[in-house]
Image: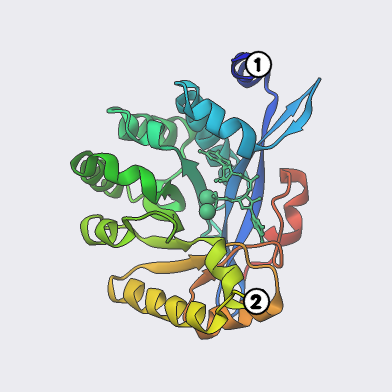
Amino acid sequence: RRLEEELRVAIAAGELTLHYQPQFRLPHQQLSGCEALVRWHNPRRGLISPATFIPLAEESALIVDLGYWVMERACRQALEWDFVGRNLGMSVNVSAHQFEQPDFVERVRTILHTTGFPGEHLILELTESLVLRDISQAQRHVNDLHTHAIRIAIDDFGTGYSSLNMLAQLPFEHLKIDRSFVRDLTAQEAYAEPSRARVLMRGITGLAHSLQLKVIAEGVETDEQLSLLQELGCDKVQGYLLGRPVPPEEAAVWLERVQ
Ligand code: G
Ligand code: G
Ligand code: MN
Ligand code: NA
């Protein structure tokens, strides 16, 4: 309750910032874009993780305002970094509550209009649990987003229980493999079965490609994971190995890695 109140004030007071984590295309590891990740610097509490305050914001209408704030900020940043001229994509997370607003697409369109950022450089990351709550609304929103050339990624793929159902009904562009799968590829624990994890990963990429979807793996932390993912047909990668989420002033390190 109190934290929620503080978060409301924080948005207005400009205490939220965005960090950006690079994404790379395989096999040559060219930069393909980045994901915007929100951070909250509270003067009293210090840095508060989104893992703490996003779920809190999701309990109220706050997540909606926060979501549009992030989207607009990320679009402006991408323009500043010349994502259009360099053909890069900006990925932004969208919460269930935000996506379910009847005027969702309208608000996104307004952001594109006021910032001047073209929809073809925007990728919205939706978690799979959200989209199935109202499949026909989701289909309408996805179709409307496509008329603005906005692409959609299913985030945390494989962790929900209705992944395949969703793949059947919604035409997305990207499938983002949850990092638990990436971890399992090279897991050393006694209970782990990396060989099964690899078969599963190859199956998922094959399935995705048959549906014309690109596969992006998140949470890539080691060279071994990276080369396995490449071998198993993954199209893009994101993770600490290739770049942590950083504030905009530190993004120059990877922004120059464009071919
Ligand atoms: O960046 P980090 O790993 O700390 O993020 C923790 C969680 O918060 C992740 O699940 C991530 O998707 C989520 N998150 C980060 N930024 C945003 C945002 O702008 N909007 C939403 N809805 N979730 C976010
Ligand atoms: O759920 P979502 O994919 O939006 O979450 C992104 C979160 O994953 C961010 O909070 C980011 O900090 C975190 N993250 C990014 N790369 C890695 C990684 O290589 N390992 C781990 N453990 N977390 C990562
Ligand atoms: Mn995400
Ligand atoms: Na994820």
Asked if one can make out residue 27 in the rendered structure from this viewpoint, the answer is no
Nearest-to-viewer mark from 2 and 1: 2
Q: Which residue is mark 2?
A: 190
Question: Is residue 235 shown above or below 106?
Answer: below
Residue at screen point 18% across, 42% down: 136
The mark found on residue 258 in the picture is: none
Q: Residue at x 32, y 75 (%)?
A: 207
Q: Amino acid at mark 2?
A: Ala
Amino acid under label 1?
A: Glu
Name the image quarter holding residue 13: top right
Q: Nearer the viewer, residue 146 or 141?
A: 141
Q: Earlier in the sequence, mark 2 or mark 1?
A: 1
Disc 2 to disc 1, C-alpha distance: 44 Å
How crowded pointer 1 is (Cα within 10 Å; few <14, some 14-19, many 20+) is rated as few
Task: Report the residue at 28% width, 40% height from top.
Answer: 133
Q: Residue furthest left?
A: 136
Label 2 crowd (10 A; few <14 / some 14-19 / many >=20): few
Under tag 2, what secondary structure?
loop
Total number of numbered discs in the rendering: 2
Q: Residue furthest front?
A: 190
x and y, in percent, of residue 237 in the image: 57, 68
For residue 6, the mark is 1
Q: Nearer the viewer, residue 245 or 73?
A: 245
Q: Ligand 1 near label 1 (Cβ, under 8 Å)?
A: no
Residue 169 pos. (x, y %): 21, 56
Residue 229, can we see it? yes
In this rendering, the answer to whether 241 lies above or below 108 is below
> The C terminus lies in which quarter of the figure?
bottom right
